[in-house]
C-alpha cells in the first residue's frame, strides 16, 4: 500500500531530524521498560561529561550567563552541554522539532571569539543557548507547527525576536515540538509524534509549547521561549514544573511566526504573546528585561514603547487579590488547597490578601473561544487536506470546518470584549478602593491530568482576552495526603466543563486512580494589569520567596 | 410644505442651543458686512469686562491654571470669561454644538469651594475650563456629531476622558461643532451649519474638530480636546494657527465616544486618537502629562500603561529628519518653502537635519482610505435615512453606499498595514544608523484653502495608519512674497490628487487668487515613533523655540 503524502513527508522529516543527532549522542535502545521518570536517564547515558552534567543541572540561566560573561565558561562549552542534553531529551520525550546543533556550535565559537577579541559581551544573553518553540521562523529552517503541509518550506527570514536574540549574542540550537495546528493542550502530531512529560510519562506534557516544557524539565534547555494565545505557555509550564510569563501581546516581538492562520487573522481577532519559560523566576526577568532594554519596538512595529523600568512595579507593601474560581469550572480539591496554602503563607508573613469576586470572569472563556474560530478553521483544514493529513485523535472530535464569521459577527465579539475589559478593570481595586498589586488564581481547575485529558482553558485564556500579563509559579508536589480530599458534598455542578472536570477527581464510568497525580507539580497563576510585566515579575518573585521560605 | 424630520430636529436643536446663551451675552445683529477677521468683534461687543478680556487673551492654559491654583483667579471668574467668549465665538463662527454654561459655572463654584475648604487643588487642571469636540459623551448631553438621527439622544454615561477630566477638577462648559458624519475636512452640517474660520472667513476652519479649532482661534477656549483618525485634530489646528498633538491611539482614553460607526468597527479597522489643541506647545504637554500621570489605564482598558516620564525623550543633541513629500501630492511652493525655512533654521542653530526618503509613505493614504470604508458607509446612510437627512453638498459627491467588506478583505488590509509599518520603521534611522529623534513634514500639501477645498489627507492619515504621534507647529503667516513663487516648470504631475492640488495654486478653468492665502498660518507637522508622546512634545518645543527665536 502506498503511503499518503503526509506520511511520506513525516518520514522524511523525522529521518532528517534523527540524522542531525551525532551518532555518539544517540541513546542505546532501552533494554528494559522505561521508568515513569525519564530524567535520571540523562546521567545514566554517560553522554554528558561530569562538567556538562554540572553545567546543565546546577544553574539557572542567570547564574550560567554570568559565568559566560566572566569568562569562567565558554559559550561553546555551555552550548555543547545543552546540545547533548537536548539530543537525549528528544530521544526520550520527542520534544524537539528542529535541530540546529552544528550552526549553534559555530555561532557559540563566534561569540566566544568576539568576547575574546573585544573583551566585551553583547549583553546578559551573550553566548547563552536559548530554545524556541517551533513557531519562531529562523531563516532556512522549517516552522511546520506539526503539520506536514508546512514542512519542508524553510523560512525566508528570521522572526523579529530571532533577530533580536542573535543581536544579543544568544545561541539558537533547537526548536521544540507543538501539537498539530497548535490548537491542542498536549503536544502531539504526525511529524514528531507526542511529546512526553519527562517527570511522569503518564501525565500530559501540555501544549502548545509542550516540547519547550519537556525540554526544560529535562534541562535540555535552561531558557526557552514559548507563545500563548489560550494558555500555551502557562499550561506546559505547569505541566513541567516551570516558571513562565505570558506577557501582554505588545511586549515581546511576535512578528514573523508561523501560527497556522491566514495572515491578518490576529489583527481582527486576539493577539498571541511570546514569553519566557524557565526554571527560576529571575530567569523570566532576565529574558524580559534584556529584550525590553534592547528597544524591541525598533524591530517590531507592534511592540509597545517602554523599557523594563517603565513596566510598572509592585507596591512597597503589596496587596494581593485571590480569585478562587473562574465561575465555569470549580477547582478540584488539590488546586483549591494549594491556592489557599499560598494565600495563607502570604497572610502569615504579614502580606494582605483579599478575596475578589469577578462575575465577568466566566464570560471570558466562551468569548475567547469564539474568537479562536473566526475563520471557522477553514485554513487549518485546507492545509491538512493539501497533504491528506488527518487530524490527530484529540482534535478529531473537537475541530470541524465551519462557515467563517462575517464582519458583523467579528465586530460583535469585539463589542463584548470591550465590555468585559471594562468590567474586569474592577478587580484591580479592593472594596476600600485600594490598588490590588497582583491577583493569584489557579492555572487550571485540575492537577496535572493524564495524556489528552486537559480540561478547559478558562483560567488561562481569559488573560489573553484581557491582554493581562500572567505568570506560573510552581508551588509544591502533589502528595499522598492530597489524595484524600473530597469535593464538598452537594456542591453545585456549574455545567459541562465542571462536570468533566469533576470526573478527573471522582471518576465517571471508570474509577480515577488519583495516584496518577502523585509527584506532579501544583502551581498557581499570578496576574497583573495590562503591559505591567515588571509589576508581574516582582509579584511572582515576592510570592515565590515567601513560598520557598515556607516549604 | 411640511418640514422633513431632519429639518424639524435641526430647528429644535438650534433653538435649544440659542436659548442656552444668556440674553446679555447675545450680539446685536451686525449693522454692516462682517469683516474677514472676526476676532476684533469680541472686544467690540463690550460683553466681556476688561478683566475677562485679559483672562481670555493674555494667557495660555499653563499660565492661567497656575493663577487658579495660586488663588489669584477663581475658577468661576475664568469660567465666566470663557463662557462669555465662547458664546460670542459661536454667534460669529457657529463653533459650538452643545452649551453647558450653567452647569459649568456651578462646577466652577464647587471646585473653588473645595479649593477654599481644603487648601488643595486636584492637579494642574483644577478649575480650568476645557472645551471638547462633540464626539465626547457627557451624561445627559447629546453627541449628535452633526447628524439629526443622533440628536436628542442624551448620553447615559460619560466618556472615560470626561470622567478623568472631572476628577482632575476641569470644568466642561461646551462641546464643539463637527462635519456631518465626522467624515469631512470642513465642519458643516444641517444642525449647526458651517463653522467659519475666525481669522479669515474666506478659508476653511478645517475638520473634523473644526468647531474646536475656531473656538480656540477666537480664544473662546484656551485648551480643547479633539479627535483624529485622518487628520481631524491636525487639520483644524493648522487652519486656526494652533498647536496640537494627535497621540498614538492607546495614549488618551477614547472609550465612550460617538463616532457614528457601528460598535466594534474600530477594533477591526483603525483606531482614532484623542488629543489636545492649544495656543502654545507647553499646553499640549500640560494636557498629556496630566492625563498620563492620572493613570488613564485604570479608567479605559485600552490605554497603554506608562506615565509621562516613560513616554520617551528627545536626544540631548537631537537629530531631525525631514520628509519633504508623501509621494502622492507634491507640496505647493509656500508649503515646501516654510518646511525648508524650518530646516534651515534648525541647521543654522547647529541642529542636524537629514533628508529622508520613504518610498512606503505613498502607500499609506490609499490603505488608510480603504480602512475608512470597511463598512461601505452603510451605517452612516442608515442613520441619515432614518431622519430623511440628505448629505451635505461636499459629502454628497464623495460618499456612496457600498457593500461592506468581507472578513478576508479586512484581513488583507491588515496584512498590507503590517508590511507598511515594518517598512516605515526605517525612517527612524539615518544612513549611518543613527537614531532620528523626530521627523518634520508638511501637514498638508497646500496652504489653508477656501471653504470645502481641502485636498487630500495623505500627510496626516499616514500617521494614523502607523499610529505615530504627530503634532502641528504654526510657523508664520503666508505673506505677499509667498504669492510670487511658482511651481518648478516641467515638474511631473503625480496623479489626480497632485493635479487637483496644483489647481489650488495655478488655477484650472478659473484663475486662483492667491491673495486668499494672505495672513493664513503656515504650519509644519512633527512626528515621533509610536507611543513616544513625550519625545514628540520635546521635539515640538525644541523646534518651536528655535523658530520663535528666528521670527
Image: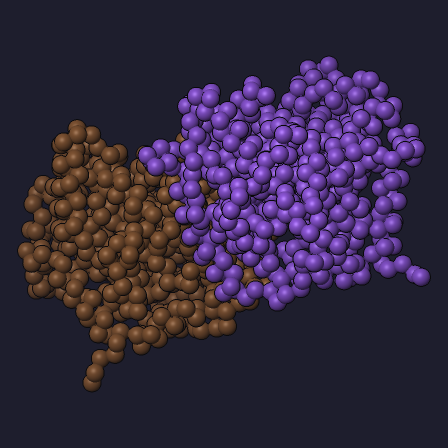
Chain colours: A brown, B purple
Q: Nearer the viewer, residue B496 or B141?
A: B496
Q: Residue at x 42, y 60 (%)?
A: A263
Q: Nearer the viewer, residue B497 or B23?
A: B497
Q: Is residue A234 left or right of residue B345?
A: left
Q: Quadrant of the N terminus of chain B?
A: bottom right
Q: Residue at x 79, y 37 (%)?
A: B93
Q: Is residue A271 left or right of residue A227?
A: right
A190, above or below B19, in the image: below
Image-quadrant location for residue A168: top left
Where residue B172 appears, as percent x and y from the top left, is 74, 34
A148, above or below A475, in the image: below
B69, above or below A257, in the image: above
Taking the image as drawn, is residue B383 in sight? yes
Q: Residue at x 74, y 28 (%)?
A: B219
Taking the image as drawn, is residue A303 in sight? no
Return the residue found at the far bottom: A1
Where residue A326 appears, as percent x and y from the top left, is 50, 53
Q: Quadrant of the C terminus of chain B?
A: top right
Q: Residue at x 60, y 28 (%)?
A: B475
Where residue A428 appears, as percent x and y from the top left, is 54, 40
Where residue A56 appears, as percent x and y from the top left, is 17, 44
Amino acid at each position: 500500500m502506498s503511503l499518503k503524502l503526509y506520511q511520506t513527508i513525516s518520514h522524511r522529516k523525522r529521518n532528517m531530524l534523527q540524522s542531525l543527532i551525532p551518532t555518539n549522542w544517540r541513546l542505546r535502545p532501552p533494554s528494559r521498560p522505561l521508568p515513569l521518570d525519564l530524567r535520571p536517564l540523562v546521567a545514566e547515558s554517560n553522554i554528558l561529561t561530569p562538567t556538562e552534567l554540572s553545567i546543565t543541572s546546577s544553574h539557572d540561566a542567570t547564574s550560567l550567563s554570568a559565568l559566560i560573561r566572566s569568562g569562567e565558561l565558554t559559550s561553546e562549552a555551555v552550548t555543547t552541554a545543552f546540545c547533548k542534553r537536548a539530543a537525549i531529551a528528544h530521544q526520550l520525550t520527542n520534544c524537539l522539532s528542529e535541530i540546529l546543533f552544528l550552526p549553534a556550535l559555530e555561532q557559540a565559537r563566534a561569540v566566544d571569539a568576539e568576547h575574546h577579541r573585544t573583551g566585551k559581551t553583547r549583553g546578559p544573553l551573550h553566548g547563552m543557548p536559548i530554545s524556541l518553540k517551533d513557531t519562531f521562523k529562523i531563516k532556512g529552517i522549517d516552522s511546520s507547527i506539526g503539520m506536514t503541509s508546512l514542512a519542508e518550506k524553510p523560512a525566508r527570514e528570521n522572526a523579529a525576536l530571532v533577530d533580536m536574540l542573535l543581536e544579543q549574542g544568544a545561541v539558537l540550537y533547537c526548536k521544540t515540538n507543538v501539537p498539530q495546528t497548535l490548537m491542542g493542550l498536549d503536544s502531539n502530531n504526525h511529524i514528531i509524534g507526542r511529546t512526553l512529560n519527562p517527570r511522569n510519562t503518564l501525565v500530559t506534557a501540555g501544549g502548545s509549547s509542550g516540547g519547550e516544557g519537556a525540554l526544560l524539565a529535562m534541562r535540555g534547555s535552561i531558557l526557552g521561549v514559548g507563545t500563548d494565545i489560550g494558555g500555551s505557555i502557562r499550561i506546559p509550564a505547569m505541566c513541567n514544573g516551570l516558571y513562565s510569563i505570558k506577557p501582554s501581546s505588545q511586549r515581546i516581538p511576535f512578528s514573523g511566526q508561523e501560527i497556522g492562520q491566514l495572515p491578518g487573522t490576529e489583527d481582527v481577532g486576539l493577539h498571541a504573546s511570546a514569553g519566557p519559560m524557565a526554571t527560576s523566576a529571575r530567569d523570566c526577568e532576565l529574558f524580559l528585561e534584556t529584550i525590553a532594554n534592547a528597544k524591541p519596538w525598533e524591530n517590531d512595529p507592534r511592540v509597545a514603547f517602554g523599557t523594563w523600568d517603565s513596566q510598572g512595579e509592585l507596591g512597597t507593601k503589596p496587596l494581593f487579590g485571590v480569585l478562587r474560581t473562574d465561575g465555569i469550572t470549580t477547582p478540584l480539591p488539590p488546586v483549591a488547597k494549594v491556592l489557599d496554602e499560598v494565600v495563607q503563607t502570604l497572610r502569615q508573613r504579614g502580606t494582605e490578601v483579599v478575596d475578589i469576586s469577578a462575575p465577568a470572569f466566566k464570560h471570558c472563556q466562551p468569548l475567547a473561544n469564539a474568537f479562536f474560530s473566526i475563520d471557522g478553521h477553514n485554513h487549518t483544514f485546507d492545509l491538512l487536506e493539501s497533504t491528506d493529513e488527518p487530524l490527530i485523535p484529540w482534535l478529531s472530535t473537537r475541530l470541524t470546518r465551519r462557515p467563517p464569521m462575517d464582519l458583523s459577527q467579528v465586530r460583535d465579539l469585539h463589542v463584548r470584549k470591550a465590555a468585559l475589559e471594562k468590567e474586569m478593570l474592577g478587580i484591580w481595586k479592593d472594596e476600600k478602593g485600594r490598588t490590588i498589586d497582583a491577583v493569584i488564581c489557579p492555572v487550571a481547575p485540575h492537577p496535572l491530568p493524564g495524556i489528552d485529558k486537559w480540561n478547559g482553558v478558562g483560567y488561562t485564556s481569559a488573560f489573553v482576552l484581557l491582554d493581562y500579563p500572567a505568570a506560573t509559579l510552581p508551588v509544591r508536589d502533589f502528595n499522598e495526603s492530597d489524595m484524600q480530599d473530597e469535593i464538598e458534598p452537594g456542591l453545585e455542578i456549574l455545567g459541562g466543563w465542571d462536570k468533566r472536570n469533576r470526573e478527573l477527581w471522582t471518576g465517571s464510568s471508570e474509577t480515577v486512580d488519583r495516584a496518577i497525580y502523585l509527584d506532579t507539580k501544583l502551581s498557581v497563576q499570578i496576574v497583573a494589569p495590562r503591559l505591567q510585566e515588571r509589576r508581574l515579575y516582582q509579584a511572582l518573585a515576592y510570592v515565590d520567596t515567601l513560598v520557598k521560605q515556607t516549604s
